[in-house]
């Protein structure tokens, strides 16, 4: 197959940067989307920013997009987890459906998290799945005021996984030949997690929350390899799945 065009959010760092590098090495064209150092500079925390980003990607792709991978997200407790992690993915991907449907082999993969197995706030999740961002932010404000801000990350990622599983078989997706899947990583080595790992007390807490008996912590490239397969033409029938790339954490926890 000829060169494929894939949009990657969060392309300037972490998993997004690793995936961008991998796709380019295998001959694909990547349209990077990020707050800086990207082909499309965009703020995915706002509805207008998401639509503008999708329009810019569609234009850059000439109206035909072969793949979308959403790596953009935040782990800083607060309402941005709802704005970026959930709506920053769902609004962006939905807006790109027409460009994906125009491709001969369109593919979508979104980055979830092992944290989706942890306790979430049901009101935040329900509002996200209803597509009501204002209500979701109101619910998030309650969570923050109750000093449960740490629940917003698993809430956003749990809602995202449920959205993807539901959407994968809705009209315009599977029937348009668009597989839609979630990759849920365990602990990925980044500057932030390396600091936690260096602290013996925090490392023990993290290892209890995300036990990874198979090969330990992940490199960004480990996650990128799975994402690259899911948005490749070779993935013809996998859709609506949450693929845990976690060294056995989900199995251990459940």
Image: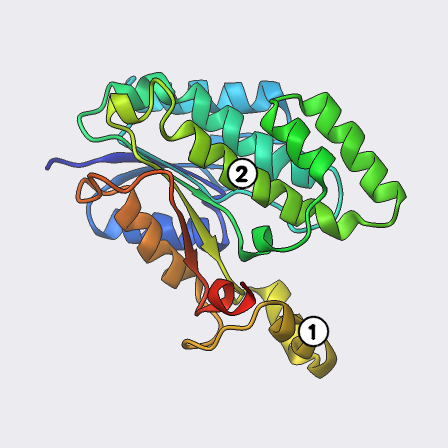
Inspect this view and state whether residue 20 appears.
yes
In this view, the residue in front, 121 or 87, is 121
- Residue 76, above or below 40: below
Tag shown at residue 160: 2
Q: Quadrant of residue 115?
A: bottom right
Percent coordinates x, y for residue 243 in the rendering: 39, 52
Asked if the residue at tag 2 contacts the one at tag 1, i.e. Cβ–Cβ closer than 8 Å, the answer is no
- Residue 171, above or below 199: above
Percent coordinates x, y for residue 69 in the rendering: 40, 40
Say few, some or many: other residues with alpha carbon within 10 Å of mark 1 (under 14 / 14 to 19 / 20 or more): few
Q: Quadrant of residue 135?
A: top right
Number of marks: 2
Residue at point 80%, 28% (across, down): 138
- Residue 69, above or below 136: below
Name which of mark 1 and mark 2 comes first in the sequence: 2
Q: Quadrant of residue 231?
A: top left
Residues at marks 1 and 2, CA–CA distance in whole angstroms: 25 Å
In this view, the residue in front, 69 or 39, is 69
Query: Which type of secondary structure does the marked residue at label 2 adopt?
Result: helix
Percent coordinates x, y for residue 188 in the rendering: 51, 64
Residue at point 41%, 77% (across, down): 215
Tag shown at residue 17: none
Inspect this view and state whether residue 43 appears.
no
Residue at point 67%, 79% (across, down): 204
Percent coordinates x, y for residue 152 in the rendering: 71, 45
Asked if residue 7 lies left or right of residue 218, the reply is: left
Residue at point 61%, 21% (across, down): 47
Outermost residue, bottom side: 200
Tag shown at residue 205: 1
- Residue 136, above or below 189: above
């Amino acid at each position: 197959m000829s060169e494929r065009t894939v949009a990657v959010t969060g392309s300037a760092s972490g998993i997004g940067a690793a995936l961008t590098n991998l796709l380019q090495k295998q001959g694909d064209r990547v349209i990077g989307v990020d707050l800086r150092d990207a082909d499309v500079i965009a703020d995915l925390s706002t509805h207008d920013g998401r639509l503008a980003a999708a329009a810019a990607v569609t234009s850059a792709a000439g109206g035909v997009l072969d793949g979308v991978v959403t790596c953009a997200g935040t782990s800083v407790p607060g309402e941005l987890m709802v704005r970026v992690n959930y709506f920053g993915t769902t609004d962006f991907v939905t807006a790109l459906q027409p460009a994906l449907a125009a491709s001969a082999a369109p593919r979508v993969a979104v980055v979830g998290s092992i944290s989706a197995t942890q306790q979430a706030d049901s009101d935040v999740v329900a509002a996200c799945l209803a597509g009501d961002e204002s209500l979701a932010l109101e619910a998030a404000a309650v969570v923050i005021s109750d000093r449960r801000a740490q629940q917003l990350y698993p809430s956003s990622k749990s809602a995202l996984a449920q959205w993807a599983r539901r959407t994968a078989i809705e009209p315009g997706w599977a029937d348009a030949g668009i597989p839609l899947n979630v990759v849920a990583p365990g602990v990925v080595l980044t500057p932030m997690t390396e600091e936690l790992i260096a602290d013996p007390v925090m490392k023990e807490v993290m290892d209890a929350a995300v036990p990874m008996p198979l090969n330990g912590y992940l490199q960004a490239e480990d996650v990128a390899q799975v994402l690259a397969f899911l948005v490749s033409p070779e993935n013809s029938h996998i859709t609506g799945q949450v693929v845990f790339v976690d060294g056995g954490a989900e199995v251990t926890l459940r």
